Image: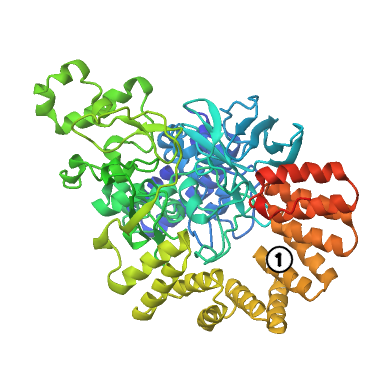
Amino acid sequence: MLPLCNLLRISQLNVLVVKTLIKQVMTSQLKTTLTICIFLLITVGLTLLFTGDDTAQEAYSQESVDNSPSLTLPTLLNYSVSKGAAQGYVDDRLCSNCHAQHSQTFQHVGMSHSFGTPAVMKKIENFTAQPFYHAKSNRYYQITQENEQLIFHRYQLDEQGNKINEWTRNIDYVVGSGNTSRSYLYQNNLGELFQLPLSWYSQTQQWQMAPGFDKAEHAGVNRPVQRQCMFCHNAFPEVEVNSDLHWQPHIFPKSLPSGIGCQRCHGPGAEHIDKVLNPIDEEPLLAIREAIVNPAKLPADQRDSVCFQCHMQPSAHLSGIRKLERADYSFRPGENLNDYLIHVDVVEQGKKQDDKFQINHHGYRLAQSECFKQSNSELTCISCHNPHQKPNKQDKNQHFANVCIDCHQDAAAVAPHTVNDKDNCIGCHMPRRRTQDVVHVVMTDHKIQRFLPKGDSQAELQEVDPVLLDMNFAWPHAAPQGSEGEMYKAITMLRAFPNANYLDYLTAMISRTEDVPIQAYFDLAQGQLSLQRYEQALNTVEIILAEQPDNQRALMWKALALFALGDNKQSAAIFATLVEQKSQISEVYFNYALLHLKLNNISQAQKLLNKTVSLKENMPQAWYYLALVADKNNQYQLAIEHLQTALAIEPSYTKAYKKIIEYYTYLGDEAQARRYTEHALKYAAQPSSLSVK
């Protein structure tokens, strides 16, 4: 006979079965009595659950249960349900209580390790390697390990071979399972995330520049990570409602989820768990199933949308935008992706459409396959890939070949080449290729082709920025039509390549479109400000403020436009209000400081600049202006220190070189003045603007 403690460690599903039996076969009075008994049994059993060695134990808190009158089963289980922009999500580890096998095997799938702190991510990199030298930007990069902490280093060498412009930063997050590569992020005090320029490439076991950084001029340590990037690299964080609309600051909580979990494909799990724990429906098992999404049972478009939310990107160089009324974290499994995101495709100079191959082209290339087109929606991602389980290495080719043979039985019986290679269909029909955007990675081309492509598909490539000749909707039938569609195209181009042509086109399309979402006016105002059309920007901002009078970004834009037009008093009043509200937009404090500098209010400017760098310590312009403030106060050594910080963040900052050379010269330190002059003449962004005596 089993020990009593084992009998009491009942699962939630067993609780459901007992309760259901009570409901269906017992009289009302007996049912009431037994339900009370069962509830007490559950209470004791779940309490023991916390002290046993059950799989579920690690998912729950070890803290003692509060024995208050409001005690409920969710309270006993001690799990929280997310609120805000992404509502109804729970800790993915809770799923393991009923779905232990799926949960266990999923831990070997790359998605489960897509994101995390250095402490939780398995170390696969070579942290003792020599610094990586990037000749195009003349910078040295290295990531080292101290205990569980990873540290990023970047520096240059001066003419004497000594380090200059050295910048060191703890790494806060690792992106990528490491199956092919990994990238690294840090988070500033404001909560913004930034990608670092160095990546680890697992296939070659070496450090190289991260995608988009292999050029002389790149974003350095200030490439912002936006919500639409994190959308596919991690589970949704818990943030306030509407804080994930496009023009809201891209600020992340200090504690983020660790990787993609169950609910990304199955939808929020709180209601599902509630149906298990509180089976009050007439058909409780049906209610439980209907409270969670099973992608395999969805209609084809919605089923594919679950995978395509992250594995469909026609172009890495020009991404489609969300529907203007949709927030970044608003997509849910069961929706059609076209109702959330408007994908675009591009024509690249010198490249045929069929020859484009990028790292996120799984769905894009599959959709070009005749097998996919002629399958009547039967062929899909999960035909080959079990999201819960990674196939064994030794069985991998046979696993995929079996999927092919299910449809191509006759071909397999007669095709001569299958006699010799019957277990590896994908070797020829889905060959591995080098991706054109992440040039240090080779991966499977998901376009199923009849004949093996000519040439060396894995030949080394150089990272180049393509010349885009044209852009259109990837699926025109599902995209907005008429002037509304053209408005979306204009916004897509304006966000990526702000210029007068796209701005004027957006202006025209907004005027022709009915019921324009307010978000379109944010794009219009941003474009007008960037092109210094301040009067137009003021008019546009007033449209936004009429609907959203407290919108801090719109208020900041109004203050900027007024500042540029010379209305310092009204501009200062708006900035002062935003500062009083403790705005999370660092540019508020920075631009208000510039206004005070213009008015020669040095002490106020200094306070605001110090506030700026306390929030956004990686902003070189703020350090530059702090140097000017120190200059005003005759603190030249402090000014030099601020400029050294600015140059450590951005080693090509011409204005900072000018000033630091000026200060060293003034202080009579000719050696340092000469050192920075020699370096600036080679590596400043505009060396010709330096006046050298």
628 relative to 18 in the view: left or right? right
Residue shown at the point (60%, 25%) measured from the top left? 126
Say which residue label 1 marks: 590
- Label 1 crowd (10 A; few <14 / some 14-19 / many >=20): many
Residue 10 visible, this orientation: no
Residue 15 drawn at (x, y percent): 44, 46
343 relative to 594 in the view: left or right? left
Residue 58 drawn at (x, y percent): 57, 38
Residue 521 visible, this orientation: yes
Residue 250 drawn at (x, y percent): 57, 59
Query: Hey, which quadrant is residue 47 in on the image?
Result: top right
Of residues 283 and 631, the one nearer the viewer is: 631
Q: Is residue 208 above or below residue 82?
A: above
Residue shown at the point (48%, 55%) measured from the top left? 228
Of residues 51 and 55, the one nearer the viewer is: 55
**How many numbered callouts?**
1
